[in-house]
Amino acid sequence: MRPVFARRRARLAEAMATAGVDALILYGNAWQNDYLRYATDFGILEGQALALARQDGEVTLYLDSPLEAERAALECAGVEVVHAPDLVVTVETALGRLRNQRIGGAPFRLLPRRIAARAKDLNLGDETSLLDRLLMGKVALEIDAMRRAARLADEGYAVFRAAARPGRADYELIAEVEAFYRAHGVDDNFQIIGVGGPEVRGMAPPGGKRLKAGDLVTTELTPCVDGYYCQICRTLTVGPASEAQRAAHALYRESMEAGLGVVRDGVTAADIARAENDVFRRHGLGDYITSEYTRVRGHGMGLFADTKPHLLENVTTRIDAGMTLIVHPNTYHPVVGYMVLGDAVVVTDDGADLLTAMPRDLFAVPA
Amino acid sequence: MRRGLMRWDEGELPLGVFEQRMQRLRTAMRTAGLDALVLYTNLVRPSGVHYLTGFTPYWSEGLLLVGRDGPPVFATALSKRVAEWIRSVSPVGDIVNTPQPGTVLGQRIAADPSVRRVGVLELDAFPAGSYEEMSAAAPGREFVDATALFAELRRKTDAAERRLLARADAIAVAALQEVDAADAADAGAVAGAVEKRARLEGAEEAYIAVAPDLATERRMIRTAPSLALKDMFALRVSVAYKGNWVRRTRTFARDGGARQDLSRAEKWFASLIASLPAETALAEQIEAEVQQLPGARLVSFMAEGAIGSYPLQVIAASNAPPSRRLGDFLVLTVELVIDGRPWLGAAPALVGNASLT
């Protein structure tokens, strides 16, 4: 069992004991896997899974995919793996055997309807927040994994830059990054991309657009190492940047650095978002920090690429030392189009340690 | 998450195909006494919604409501800013961006008093939060499981689906051609080359798994750095092209004698795939065919199809009760021992047809 997983298991047992929860039922799939991974260390790809974690440390992982069950049996030390073709009924039966015990579910909204419908009968309550607290506050071993992921985020972006040239399609750039990541043991990667000019309002999966001179190429790149995701956001130009592109990038950099300057133990998510947004407001671009143009000004990272807290001016979550965040003032710019810039940090008592090390430049590749 | 090519191309998937699929679904709904059907989607369970709309979420989740007539309604937690992208990859239906898709669809159901009985694909596994929102917003409505109804619809592929499956298979075949057994040493490097080829060929998604040393373990794992490939190894590539999934597995050997056995097994498997009859039970057919391969013994088989929300789900297996309700498309995975050596193979097939096209 990897040390970071052993440490998580101990924290989970401790939190369950404190909360008086005897067992947890945790749901996971390839999209939302952080709750499941916390207790099993399994990075599921296909199908769905439920894990039953008991306070004594025993964990049973139920998977409906036979291929994934085979893989989990080899990859998950210290976890009992069960192939359950009828996942819902199998787990419902297992929960039924835990009579007179207090069971928690997380994330409760994603539990199968049939199991949630028996919540009262099974003494099953919503313990999503218990897991959320564990997921947000990282211990040292988790931060070590985040640092490894950050290094690969930097290296992956270097591969992305090297792949970018006129005539290449957006999906070809991502193919190069993925090849690099598979060769370096990266389990997964959250990545979206934008190519073009003022007509580009955001990033999405690649649609086959080919790079041409003058384009902005944006990407959010988020490799997963040992289960932990770390993100970097950068923008490049195809050919030399225009004056407008350089000016816009300077504004985004000022905004990101204003946000990073606020990060420390004890502030709120809103404080960081406000610092970023104030820069846009000062430059007369206050309209472009609304939900019409942007989603969040950053977010947590860890066993999920986009975990709580979301950095928004109406989110009052306290930021604690040990949290890992990306600060990214990504939004639409009315002159040059969608632009991104973001760095990952770990929160400390008096500031933030940078995880990503890529220069904060507006990169340019030859046209 | 999905990060490969995602684009709707009308030449590949004409609007008329969606209309025909919707028409078939509505006929089945009428027969079953359903006034509406609700399907859930996320990147793990995209196939039901994709079949009807062409849409796969690269992230997040959504719900599709199909009524007795009119355009379907797709409600998704993806933000409003993504609506333009959704429209670019999905030409069908109305799109509603909302943090509570269940509530929105429940309200739509409640707004039509003639909608009393609503089918739900995979009702038991429906996410509890979305179901709670939907049922609370549509009081007095009956929600019933419609998994069998939808599976019956999906057991018959149409020409457009077969063309896309053929393209996915061509990508998988090309990707596996990147493996040179004589030179392959590191599993991570090989997986990277295979995945790169798949993505450069336009794969929407590619999952690579490896059994690095078949002499000791035939189960597959994801690759890791510095994982050495031994004398006999196997690779599985699962590929999606425009929402249509196939798998291919190949076994590789460095030794000449082993390669001869592999070659015999590959020819046997290709012949089996090309000749799966529609009316014979799959287990009996495979057992009979194995008898034709000297020195071979069947260890296991598994057939997967796209009959629900999963891209591929098990529809028959050697460790499950026999099934005669397979459908015309499947991915067949077979494990043999041939002259004492393990052999793994997987490929897509059209039951009763020689090839996917």
Image (tube, coloured by chain):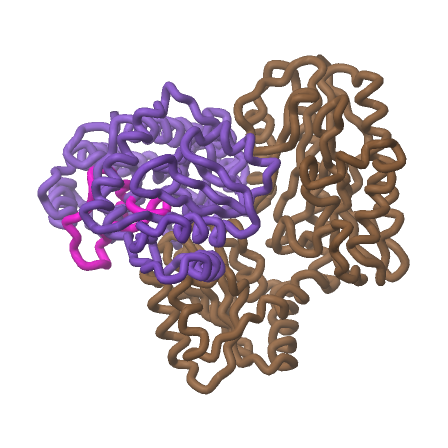
Chain colours: A brown, B purple
Nearest the eye: A276 or B241? A276
Q: Is B122 placed left or right of B24 in the picture?
A: right
Residue that appears at 18% across and 36% down: B351
Residue A168, position in %: x, y? Answer: 59, 18
Residue that appears at 24% across and 49% down: B149
Q: Quadrant of the N terminus of chain A?
A: bottom right
* Residue B317 falls inside the magenta stretch: yes
* Residue A282 falls inside the magenta stretch: no
Q: Quadrant of residue B248?
A: top left
Residue A9, position in %: x, y? Answer: 60, 70
Residue A87, position in %: x, y? Answer: 36, 63
Is residue A148 visible to the viewer in this orientation of the structure?
A: yes
Instruction: Answer above or below: position of B78 versus A323.
Output: above
Numbered circles on residues, count: 0
Q: Is A45 placed left or right of B286 in the picture?
A: right
Instruction: Answer above or below: position of B250 versus A38.
Output: above
Residue A268, position in %: x, y? Answer: 81, 58
Q: Quadrant of residue B292?
A: top left
Q: Which residues are magenta?
A: B307-336
Residue that appears at 12% across and 39% down: B278
Nearest the eye: A282 or B224? A282
Q: Residue furthest bottom?
A: A100
Instruction: Answer above or below: position of A65 versus A78.
Output: above
Is residue B226 visible to the viewer in this orientation of the structure?
A: no
Q: Quadrant of residue B350?
A: top left
Residue that appears at 39% across and 21% down: B10
